[in-house]
Amino acid sequence: MNILITTGIFPPDIGGPATYVKNIADEFTRQDHIVRVITYSNQKMEDKEEYEIFRIKRGRNKLWRYLKYFFTVLRRASWADVIYVQDAVSAGLPTVYANIFLRKKIVLKVVGDYAWEQAQNQFDVRDDLDAFQHQKYDNRIEFWRRVQKFVAKKSAAIITPSEYLKKIVKCWGESDEKIKVIYNSFNEPEEIGENIDVPDGEIIFTAGRLVPWKGIDTLIKIMPRIIEKRPEAKFLIAGDGPEREGLQNLIVEKGLEDKVKLLGRIEHSKLLDYLKKSNLFILNSSYEGLSHQILEAMWTGVPITVSCVGGNPEVIENEKSGLLFEYNNRDEIIDAAVKILSNNEFANQFSENALRKIKQFSFDDMVKKTLFVLKKDV
């Protein structure tokens, strides 16, 4: 097939969605499909992939950015058999409007709710994603909600990476039959990459966009209590985002400069190396579709504790492959962290079970199921 992938992010951007697009584009190409990728990027790249990548400068003017994306899709998609869209707004909206003229099959992958993210980031809405589906908000929030519903409606099929996200998309008015659950997977790298130095001590590690719903501020606030019980504990945070300055100020305010470090954006190979060298991976998020970061942590063998939200319980079995806690519940988070850090036998059992569990998230199976959806009725 000729497959056009339209996406908001692509390496060197960090994060699960960017990694997913590269991995699946590489595999489609290996299986002799013709692939092109359209993405936003502010970096000039000498792409070495065996497929074309068209990078559109993000810029500050969102309307102009979308127009450039629209015209790029219009110019580059005429040859495509199917367009595989990676989000319902930044890539989805210009793609769907271009498709008015192209009339190609569109398959949409939904990994989150853009309207809810904007409500959290810009309008200080603190309702969780489930509650958000049944409330009315500011007209600007409702505009983005209408946009993603419009893009979903115009798609021939929708792929979600978890049963939880399928439930969310059904709240948008889409039918059960139209939504296909295909779990994300982890494509094992040939090598971890560069060696990195980590501080001495017990390393607690987290990674992701620095946004409110990741709950990183709570993790910083509870570090003094964890340190009381595990004096060698240190907390490393990988990622960047709008909360970075506030989190750095919080670290200083708590006097934790020697115990908590913001690492910023790091290369994917280094991220895996940090996971390998950590004693605990923690994710205190109020929402996850199906976290690629958890899959990577499982593969590296680091013991895991995560919030019991979204798709997390579909990956981590409590007391078997890790520990689950209630989002932002400080006592539960502290208890889980200390329990893992203080008992190596307990932690090793979690790691062994997680390594067995991740085999269920087969990369080949994910690709096979995705291609089936893309090919159907083409």
Image (spheres, helix red, strand yellow):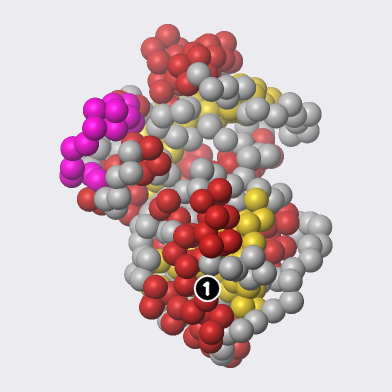
Residue 143: in magenta span: yes
Near-viewer residue (34 or 283): 283
Percent x, y for residue 339? 49, 85
> Which segment is the magenta one?
132-148
Q: What kind of residue is marked 1?
A: Met
Residue 184: in magenta span: no
Which residue is located at x 74 percent, y 34 percent? 49
Percent x, y for residue 333? 43, 74
Q: Residue furthest right?
A: 195
Can residue 162 be seen here? The reply is yes
Instruction: Say left or right for 134 vs 112.
Output: left
Residue pointed to by mark 1: 223
- In terms of secondary structure, what is the magenta stretch mainly? helix
Percent x, y for residue 68? 54, 14
Mark 1 lies on a secondary structure that is: helix
Instruction: Say left or right for 90 vs 50.
Output: left
Residue 143, image quadrant? top left
| 373, above or below 325, in the image | above
